[in-house]
Amino acid sequence: MGARPYLLSRIALMAAGWDQRMPEIEIYTQPRCAYCLAARRLLTAKGLAFREIDAPHGSPERAEAIHRSGGRTTVPQIFIDGEPVGGADELAMLERSGELDRRLGIAAGQP
Ligand SMILES: N[C@@H](CCC(=O)N[C@@H](CS)C(=O)NCC(=O)O)C(=O)O
């Protein structure tokens, strides 16, 4: 699903010394969550490192996710360099449109 060109371009940029850093990706999840699994799979397939934050119902982490996402109560909630992306559906949509790579590229300081 487009992971290969992304990884190859990433490796090429790293080899050229232009890619100084990976974007910081955070994902708030809860156990037994199919959408969380889908989002994790997509990120992993693209070779992206991410920080997973366990955010079950009623936890301070869930409250934090709701606050940071501007009121979204579902998980996953995903952030790229602090910017809210939305949930698994939004992540998949961004991937299909190519917007995710663009956001990752910008976040990584690519030209
Ligand atoms: N459209 C959302 C759906 C996410 C969703 O429904 N997640 C479930 C868990 S798998 C959820 O948070 N349900 C409400 C709840 O547990 O309070 C997405 O793509 O992330």
Image: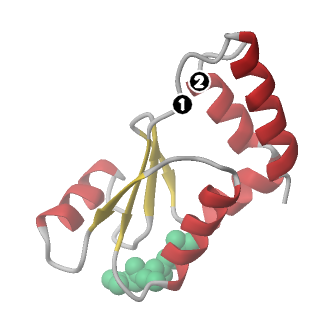
Of 98 and 6, nearer the camera is 6
Q: Quadrant of ligand 1?
A: bottom left
Q: Is residue 90 above or below residue 81?
A: below
Residue at 74%, 53% in the rendered image: 95
Left or right of 29 in this view: 1: right
Q: Position of residue 94 (x, y in %)?
A: 71, 51
Check disc 2 and report its element: helix, strand or loop. loop
Q: Is residue 54 above or below residue 3?
A: below
Query: Quadrant location of the C terminus?
Result: top right
Q: How many marks are shown on the rendered structure?
A: 2
Q: Position of residue 23 (x, y in %)?
A: 51, 33
Q: Residue lying furthest front in this view?
A: 15
Q: Position of residue 26 (x, y in %)?
A: 40, 50
Q: Is residue 21 above or below residue 4?
A: above
The amino acid pointed to by label 1 is Met
Ligand 1 within 8 angstroms of badge 1 C-beta: no
Check disc 1 and report its element: helix, strand or loop. loop
Left or right of 16 in this view: 25: left
Marks 2/1: CA distance?
A: 6 Å
The amino acid pointed to by label 2 is Ala
**Residue 22 numbered mark, or none:** 1
Residue at 52%, 23% in the rendered image: 21
Q: Which residue is mark 2?
A: 108
Q: Position of residue 47 (x, y in %)?
A: 65, 49
Query: Badge 2: how crowded within 10 Å, few (<14), some, or many (20+)?
Result: some
Corner quadrant of residue 91: bottom right
Q: Are marks 2 and 1 in contact (CB under 8 Å)?
A: yes
Of 61 and 5, nearer the camera is 5
